[in-house]
Image (cartoon, rainbow, N blue to C red):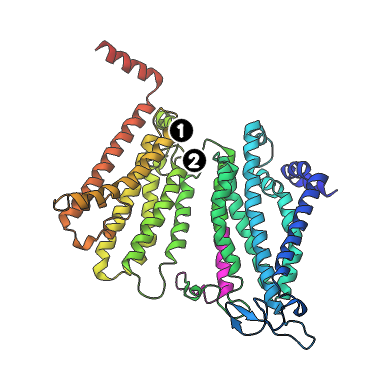
Amino acid sequence: MIIDRIGNWNPQLFRELKGRLTGRNLAIATTLSLLGQLIFGWVFYSRLPLPPDIEKLGEIPNNDYCTGSLHGGAFDCVPDGLGYWQINWSFFWWHVAAWSGVAIIVMLVVGGVYLLVGDLAKEQQRGTLNFIRLSPQSSESILIGKILGVPILVYLAAALVLPLHFGSAIAAGVSIDTILRFYGLTLAGCAFLYNVALLLGFLGGSAWLACLVVGLCQFPSIGLFRLMFPTDLRGLPAYPSLPELQWFYLPLGEQIELLHVFAFCSFAIGTFWLWQAVNRRFRDPNATISSKRQSYLAMACVQVFFVGFILVKGNIDEFSVLSGFSVFNLLVFLIGIAALTPQRAAVQEWARYRHLHPQGRSELREWILGEKSPALVAIAINLAITAIVWMPAILMLPAKSLAIAIVGLLAAAILIWIYAAIVQVLLLLKTKKRAFIAVGAVLGAIVLPPICAFVFAIRFSELAIGSHELWSFVIFGVGLAQAESLAMSTILLGFLGQVCAMGTLSWQLRRITRKLGASDTQVLLQERRVGVQ
């Protein structure tokens, strides 16, 4: 039987299918899908104009699907030789195909994500997830079995919609290669978002939270489906600014096929890095989300992806570079800090046994590549990688803005490193709520400086030292705070404050790691000496 063959290929998939493909579940999924399609068809049928004999005498109706002149956002209905209204059936079926495609995406994303995260939560509560980890299957086989098996009923419901979608798209005149590209991009997007869901599940997120996060991520997917039809059947553009879209001077907006290839490759690369994190987290729940070695290449990929949208034909303005670097990299590095920063137990083990390194493995190498060493050196290397990738965009700025941009970007990079140091130091506390304390401290470090700078600008605007120095502690950097009007002494004073913060946090981290590295016997002897004195 097919199920038995699946069991030989992937036992985890066999386990998921056997528990879900029951007669009752199949009947419910099939009924809901077909009933939804009936309601969907009735809604669109009700939007067609009523037959001429039902209309009031002498009144010409208008409708979205008629073929007459445009009046009031709709088209006048024109009768044919037999007395029926002429209907633009291509436009009607185009709408059916578009909305049925959106329905497929929503079903696969929301339903699949909810089921995956909910299944992981149940496995963790029952303790069966650790049992699965001990099975002889590879982690890749188990995760593939989860992705293919847990949402199987959602796949069935979506598959039943495919005949409606494919048939309506063909009736609307959409080419088969465009339809196949849509299916390929949908699969690529689902693979990406399902890996996000698995990662959230392994991090302890709830199913509803995962649906909210991934649901926000699916809007670009729905927009991507809309890009399958750059113009509707009336010649109106889907997105008027789409032809201007470029990536490293490639005219993505002018060539839809190129845009589809770019989107597919972006999903594929993103899925690859997410798969590495999911696989790593599944094998060891206490490990960091990403290794330091993986983070360097992943950061380069992310930065190249984003810089490509800034390096376009035309003038590159200072604001787009600074705001893009600051806001985008704030989000990227906050995720990177969370992914790379080890917990207290891991740092304690590293600090206590780091002198037992294999021959030829230096302490610096441990800081750069070590699994359990603090993440500050890795964050600094990622910042250096980011600076190298962004250098072409910076050098293309006008000469008068180049120095301002460098100052602003340097301030933003230093601030990101300070945030990483705050997180690492606070995660080494003994309290059980150290993660919440670290999150609150970083949010405070991001939000409070601009508030204080605004207050100082109003109440102490005449002072030589005031809001301008505080703007140096805002993630946007002094470049966006009218750096042209700032004196060099003011800028240097702001950087001096940042350097002092870096030095203080570095000293505190070294002190804590040295204390964590001491053995229990050394700690007891030291406490006894203090007591005797």
Which numbered circle lies on residue 288?
Answer: 2
Q: Position of residue 336 (x, y in %)?
A: 44, 48
Dot 2 falls on a residue whose secondary structure is loop
Q: Are marks 1 and 2 in contact (CB under 8 Å)?
A: yes
Which numbered circle lies on residue 346?
Answer: 1
Q: How many numbered badges does the structure rendering display?
A: 2
Q: Residue at x 33, y 61 (%)?
A: 322
Q: Is residue 523 magenta?
A: no
Q: Position of residue 361 (x, y in %)?
A: 42, 39
Which numbered circle lies on residue 300?
Answer: none
516 with respect to 216 (left or right): left
Q: Amino acid at mark 2?
A: Thr
- Which region shows up in magenta? 247-268
Toward the viewer: 293 or 99? Answer: 99
Q: Residue at x 48, y 72 (%)?
A: 245
Above-or-below relation of 343 to 384: above
Gap in angstroms between the C-alphas marked 1 and 2: 10 Å
Quadrant assignment, res 63: bottom right
Toward the viewer: 311 or 328? Answer: 328
Around disc 2, counting alpha carbons within 10 Å, would you say few (fewer than 14), some (14 to 19), or many (20 or more)?
many
Q: Is residue 265 magenta?
A: yes
Quadrant including the C terminus:
top left
Above-or-below relation of 310 to 426: below
Q: Amino acid at mark 1?
A: Ala
Toward the viewer: 235 or 429? Answer: 235
477 with respect to 106 (left or right): left
Toward the viewer: 283 or 470? Answer: 470
Q: Position of residue 416 (x, y in %)?
A: 35, 48
Quadrant assignment, res 489: bottom left
